[in-house]
Amino acid sequence: MSITNETAQEHINDLAVLCCRTEEGTILAPSNLEDPNILPDLEDSGLLEIPSDNLKIGEVLGAKLLKTVDSLTPLTPDLLEGIKELTAESESEEDQDNKNQQKKISEQSSSADNLVEDQIKSKQTTSNFSNGIVKIHIGEGKDINLEIPIGLSGVNAGENTIVNSNDGAEHSLQSEKVESPAEESLTKEINEDKKIRSLTKKHFQIDEVEIGDETKIEGTTLYLRENICQDAVGADDLVCSIKFDIITPADYDKYSETIMDVQPIATKEEDCNLGEGVTRVLDGVVIVVTGTDETGVQIGEFGSSEGILERNIMWNRPGAPDKGEIFIKTEVIIKEKTNMERPGPLAAHKASDFITQEIRNALKEVDDSLVTKEEELTQYRRPAKKKVVIIKEIMGQGAMHDNIILPIEPVGILGGEPNVDLGNVPLVLSPLEVLDGGIHALTCIGPASKETSRHYWREPLVKEIMADDELDLAGIVFVGSPQANSEKFYVSKRLGMLVETMDVDGAFITTEGFGNNHIDFASHHEQVGMRGVPVVGMSFCAEQGALVVGNKYMKYMIDNNKSEQGIENEILSNNTLCPEDAVRAAAMLKAAMFGADVKEAERHFNHHVKDKNIDLIEEETTREVELVPNEQILPKSKKRQEIYDTDE
Amino acid sequence: MSKSYLKVKNVKKFMILMNKRDIDAKMKYGDSIIKMEGIIVEVEDGAVAVDFKGRLGYLKVPKRMIICDYPLKVGQEVGLKMSFLEVLSPEVNEKYISNLAKKEIKGG
């Protein structure tokens, strides 16, 4: 298949291979060349072997062929006369472009993490000063724009790398340091970290959960009213019955229905709004929501993932229970055939929330003397630093693909609005609203990759970026993923416009699971990327969740996969975003924002890329990144033992 | 496969890679892809069900697993490529058997 002139220009630095049999004496034009995008496939299938001296498209255009050759012949210097030399300038410029274009879907998908490498070359530097800001532009096609406020004593670490590598820029910085003291204090004020709001979490330890006459907390024991279920049934007409089990670590080997959600038990103190003030939270105990319909069909069932708890839960993931915690596991039975309709899963959550609310009310009454730990979370804006936004794509296709946004109580229901009803359009939350239970996830399919309510309560990326003093976190945008593509593009365009108004320097886009949500995931990258904002994308991809579409803005990808086989392995929260992924994403976005090179992804999923990136980050930052274990640490069934223990 | 045959420094990592291809290795006909067409017969808030044309089966998937440009309606035709279902081993998985038994007791 020949290529057009336009394609040839985009791929000027890609390998030149003839698409058809070509006669001696032909002056080579794009129409003689094979599409560079399909070369890797041809290579894989054995139809093509690339020699080491294969020329590039830019070099061969206009050259004369010295002998008649067959189709799929790689062009080498001995075949041609009049080879053009590519200038260094155009090379680096095109190189970048080229990398973008070359991203094929398969490459994208399979893999993910690209290596972050700091290689900053600069040839030309121009700088100008306005409003107390030094604007340095480093050329060579990399378009690095540095905005360094004058009077900032000591440039921060990230910027340092770049400025030091560039004598010109450093020089101009020095010369501009002569300024009046008044101005200096003014800029200092502007550049200081600004405290926006804070949230205090008061932790209460629970060691025992018992049944009692009333719901109350005494010391470290939580008593649940014995007839609470009779009242919880009334939470929704669709609820036929509800019961709950108290699961202590000794019961971890028991059978459970599919886990629909894992939720913290927390409540706001009087007059406090979600995301600020004081939140009281119980440690050592979580709510686990499960349910079926009257005929025993799991809510939102597509194949089974029910089973023995300890074999189905990846402990200590942000969205999962921690090992050693007590579960209050509800089992809601809803009316037959409502398990796939929106009101069904919602009813199960409402009935469970009735129980949680009663515990919340008891928690409000508890004396402050029982507080075991106080945690203060503060949201800062850092005007002097690179401004970034976190965009979290949540499910909004309907039924259990839904989330209740901003309830009155942490991970409550009352007061919240389902994102499906809100039209899935982007909404901005403060990082503290997210960490204070602002998202009640109805948590759909794919146990290993779904984000539970507890995941948002402990969201590692939000925590990581909030704490990163090199970044200015503007806010968290939640955008739903509707069903039809027409709706997907509608919300995606709104997201683009929203991000445009924010004037950010970089963005993270995350999604949970895989499926048609990867279409909007790609579209979000395009909408943000086309506005000149580098985007780091985070998703589970690996083997099974390969992206279905790609575009040139999807060059910085982080794969959340942890499973050994790279698949959805039915183990709760196994493949969700963890602190180690957040660290890699932050490092990659910084590299992208400062114009460093990020290597292209490999064609097939390779988990060594991740290990290498972690090593690199540890080396550069002297920070130790702890990697989470995967399903291999869980007790295995005989079957799984056979599969995994082949290396013994 | 004997270890001496594996001239790989990190045997464990190598075996991880081997395991990853476990399913691939067990499937003999995995690359025989055929085109299928079907009709949407049920649209629920969370799921879509499809009858394959030619009485070739029925498939119910979560909405996330179906791609559409416009709102889903019963009667729309869908297309997909799939290969045949191959049984990976003669063994049964006890976990799934016990889950099925539990469901039967419950559903009566």
Image (tube, coloured by chain):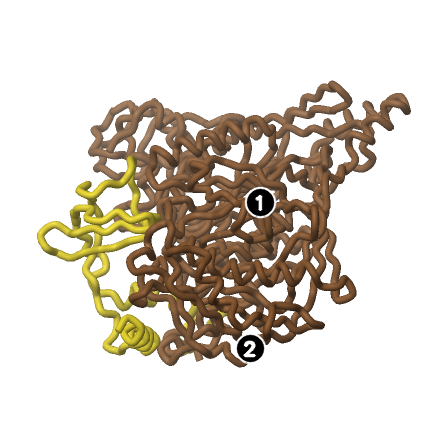
Residue neighbourhood size for the residue with mark 2, other residues' Cα within 10 Å, grouped as few (<14), some (14–19), many (≥20)? few
Task: Kindly state the secondary structure of the residue where label 2 is placed.
Answer: helix
Instruction: Check if mark 2's residue and mark 1's residue have beta carbons within 8 Å.
Output: no
In the rendered image, which quarter is residue A7 located in?
top left
Three-letter residue code for mark 2:
Pro
Residue B79's place in the image compared with A64, above or below, is below
Residue sitting at x 67%, y 38%: A472
Chain letter behind tag 1: A
Chain in brown (letter): A
Residue A362 is left or right of residue A171, and the answer is: left
Q: Earlier in the sequence, mark 2 or mark 1?
A: 2
Q: Position of residue A226 (x, y in %)?
A: 53, 73
Task: Kindly state the secondary structure of the residue where label 1 is placed.
Answer: helix
Which quarter of the rendered picture does the C terminus of chain B lie within? bottom left
Q: Position of residue A2 (x, y in %)?
A: 26, 30
Residue neighbourhood size for the residue with mark 1, other residues' Cα within 10 Å, grouped as few (<14), some (14–19), many (≥20)? many
Instruction: Name the colour assigned to chain B in the rendering.
Output: yellow
Q: A68 or A179, which lies in front?
A: A179
Kindly report which numbered mark, 2 or 1, lies closer to the viewer in this rendering: 2
Three-letter residue code for mark 1:
Met
Disc on res. A249: 2
Disc on res. A111: none
Disc on res. A588: 1
Residue sitting at x 72%, y 52%: A200
Q: Is residue A454 visible?
A: yes
Residue sitting at x 40%, y 69%: A257
Residue sitting at x 43%, y 46%: A395
How much space separates mark 2 and mark 1, taking CA atoms?
39 Å
Q: Position of residue A330 (x, y in %)?
A: 47, 67
Q: B2 or A158, which lies in front?
A: A158
Q: Position of residue A373 (x, y in %)?
A: 74, 63
